[in-house]
Image: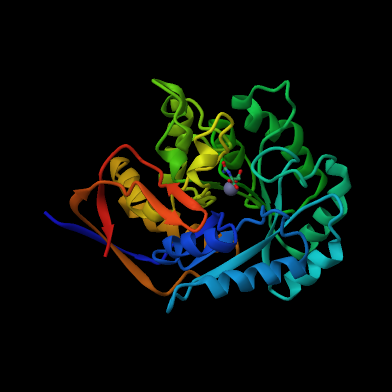
């Protein structure tokens, strides 16, 4: 029996588009299926000021394929020198949708991130006052903390203290990877939400390390044990409106990943929707797919859901595409380890 689902067009609440030739190659992979995406600011140099965000937004708009109606929702990269007034003006001008906190050194292109969280207190208080959400890369960078524990330790040492010190600050824990992340969101009020990526619903740490190192499964935060993957699947497919899709699709040219020191990031944009439909079907939760991909995130950010619809149909299984070509070289597409049965029609 053929099956099909009609959904409001999805939004991606955590996306890396890069710039230049890479931007032009990867943007159509998102605009094909998504109406809006929250654009991560970790360019080199990062998108720090309102002027940077305006210029980057215009480059994205210029790179849109013919006819695409996609809207990039911009973020600013929080630094210890960020000016609260610049942030507030960008918010008032509807230029930005959130501010992104990277602990310095936590991930790709995060060298300009925050070392001293007290130094950004003024910005966070201003954001709480105007209702501008903070998106958080939630990992400590303390080298004595095991990389698999960095998210859980961040919640206790950094995130919870920041939230207690800044009442009213709306926070999104980006790309959560642990049951501790899920539990923390569930224990808190509606000011806290979390995005969950495509790949963390599919892989655990064995996929990266068992039987050989697989650099295309390496991302940050790194995938954890199976019990954590199951907690993420339960959160994504469950009824709590604070968990929504942020793919964290993060393209890197293959030579930079297939290297003695490969960089972090999984490129999932081309096949995210077929993969997520597969996951939700496995969990007997197809009726919640639209909530996760198209409704909850918009509601958290105070935006109307998209009016346009897309249809997903279950059909002949096809192999996942292996890679795309870009002006910066080949980029491998995330392999979910199963054929794709759901197709966007
Ligand atoms: C991201 C990137 O490549 O920019 N990498 C990743 O592994 N997710 C950065 C990030 O979101 O941490
Ligand atoms: Zn990311």
Is residue 316 found left or right of 273 in the rendered image? left
Residue 164 location, x and y as percent?
A: 78, 43
Residue 303 in view (yes/no)? no
Colour scheme of this structure image? rainbow
Q: Quadrant of residue 345?
A: bottom left
Give above or below for 175 relative to 22.
Answer: above
Name the quarter where the N terminus is drawn. Answer: bottom left
Q: Is residue 64 above or below residue 128?
A: below
Residue at 43% across, 40% down: 201
Total labels: the figure holds: 0
Asked whether residue 158 appears in the rendered view, the answer is: yes
- Using the rendered view, name the quadrant where residue 114 is placed: top right
Above/below status of 121 relative to 86: above
Front-most of residues 296 and 115: 115
Q: Residue furthest left?
A: 1
> Which picture quadrant has residue 105?
top right
Judge by depth and name the residue closer to the eye, 177 or 283.
177
Residue 67: x and y in percent read: 42, 79
Residue at the spot 53% in from the left edge and 71% down from the top edge: 63
Q: Nearer the viewer, residue 14 or 121?
A: 14
Residue 52 drawn at (x, y percent): 73, 66
Tell me residue 53's x, y (percent): 70, 67
Image-based side of 209 in relation to 61, left or right: left
Which residue is more in the foreground, 315 or 57? 57
Name the residue located 29 percent from the left edge and 41 percent from the top edge. 282
């Amino acid at each position: 029996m053929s099956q099909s689902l009609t959904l409001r067009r999805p939004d991606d609440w955590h996306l890396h588009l890069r710039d230049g030739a890479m931007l032009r190659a990867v943007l159509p992979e998102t605009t094909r299926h998504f109406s809006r995406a929250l654009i991560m600011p970790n360019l080199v140099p990062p998108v720090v000021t309102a002027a940077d965000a305006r210029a980057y937004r215009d480059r994205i708009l210029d790179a849109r394929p013919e006819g695409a109606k996609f809207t990039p929702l911009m973020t600013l990269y929080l630094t210890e020198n960020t000016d609260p007034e610049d942030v507030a003006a960008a918010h008032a001008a509807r230029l930005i949708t959130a501010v992104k906190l990277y602990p310095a050194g936590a991930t790709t292109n995060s060298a300009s991130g925050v070392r001293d969280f007290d130094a950004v207190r003024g910005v966070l208080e201003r954001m709480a006052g105007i209702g501008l959400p903070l998106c958080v890369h939630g990992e400590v960078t303390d080298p004595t903390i095991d990389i698999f524990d960095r998210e859980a330790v961040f919640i206790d040492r950094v995130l919870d203290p920041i939230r207690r010190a800044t009442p009213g600050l709306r926070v999104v824990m980006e790309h959560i990877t642990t049951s501790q992340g899920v539990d923390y969101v569930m224990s808190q009020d509606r000011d806290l939400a979390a995005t969950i990526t495509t790949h963390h619903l599919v892989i655990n740490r064995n996929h990266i390390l068992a039987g050989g190192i697989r650099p295309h499964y390496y991302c940050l935060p790194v995938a954890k044990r199976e019990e954590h993957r199951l907690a993420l699947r339960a959160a994504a497919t469950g009824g709590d409106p604070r968990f929504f899709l942020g793919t964290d699709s993060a393209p890197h040219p293959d030579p930079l990943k297939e290297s003695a020191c490969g960089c972090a990031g999984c490129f999932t944009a081309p096949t995210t929707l077929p993969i997520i439909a597969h996951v939700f079907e496995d969990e007997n939760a197809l009726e919640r797919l639209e909530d996760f991909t198209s409704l909850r995130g918009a509601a958290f950010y105070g935006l109307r859901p998209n009016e346009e619809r897309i249809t997903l149909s279950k059909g002949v299984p096809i192999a996942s595409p292996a890679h795309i070509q870009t002006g910066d070289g080949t980029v491998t597409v995330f392999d979910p380890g199963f054929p794709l049965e759901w197709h966007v029609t």
